[in-house]
């Protein structure tokens, strides 16, 4: 699974800290997931990516299709800030990964 957190742009540091401390998803924070076989979604306008976490087939997809990602030896890898934005913004929106044929395909 690949999960990512979107935070509404232009929040003050105090608003971000309060949101993180509460541990709740508010209108300022959205948690999304993506699995192989699903269409890669668009990022909602006014939101930016703050964190990405991947494991399993979705992590393999990232390793096969994005070069230069910092990695750990853990089966679950997380990226934050600019690296998280890089991961999400370099995924092919409206497409998915075909594991059998090892290629990106459009879902209709």
Image (cartoon, helix red, strand yellow):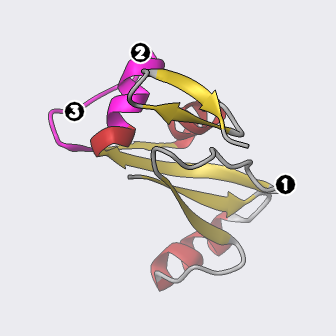
In the image, the segment drawn in magenta is 59-76
35, above or below 107, in the image = below
User: How many discs mark residues in the rendered view?
Assistant: 3
Across and down, in percent, residue 28 comes to 70, 72
Residue under label 3: 72
Nearest to the observer: residue 76 or residue 36: 36
Give the image quarter of residue 58: top left
Q: Mark 2 Cα within 10 Å, few/some/many (few <14, many 20+)?
A: few
Quadrant showing the C terminus: top right
26, above or below 71, in the image = below
Q: Please say if the residues under marks 3 and 1 sit with CB atoms less than 8 Å apart.
A: no
Is 64 left, or right, of 76 in this rendering? Answer: right
Q: Mark 1 Cα within 10 Å, few/some/many (few <14, many 20+)?
A: few
Nearest to the observer: residue 16 or residue 72: 72
Disc 3 to disc 1, how far (Cα)? 31 Å
Q: Earlier in the sequence, mark 3 or mark 1?
A: 1
Disc 1 to disc 2, how far (Cα)? 27 Å
Give the image quarter of residue 88: top right
SS label for mark 1:
loop
Is 47 left, or right, of 59 in this rendering? Answer: right
Across and down, in percent, residue 24 comes to 52, 83
Q: Please say if the residues under marks 2 and 3 sit with CB atoms less than 8 Å apart.
A: no
Across and down, in percent, residue 84 comes to 52, 40
Which residue is the extreme one toward the right? 45
10, above or below 80, in the image = below
Across and down, in percent, residue 105 comes to 61, 29
Residue under label 2: 68
Residue under label 1: 45
SS label for mark 3:
loop
Going 57% across and 77% down the picture, which residue do you hit? 19
């Amino acid at each position: 699974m690949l999960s990512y957190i979107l935070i509404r742009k232009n929040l003050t540091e105090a608003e971000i800290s309060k949101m993180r401390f509460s541990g709740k998803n508010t209108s300022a924070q959205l948690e999304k997931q993506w699995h192989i076989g699903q269409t890669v979604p668009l990022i909602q306008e006014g939101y930016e990516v703050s964190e990405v976490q991947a494991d399993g087939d979705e992590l393999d997809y990232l390793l096969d299709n994005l070069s230069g990602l910092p990695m750990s030896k853990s089966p679950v890898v997380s990226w934050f800030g600019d690296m998280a934005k890089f991961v999400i913004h370099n995924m092919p929106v409206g497409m998915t990964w075909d594991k059998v044929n090892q290629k990106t395909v459009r879902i209709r």
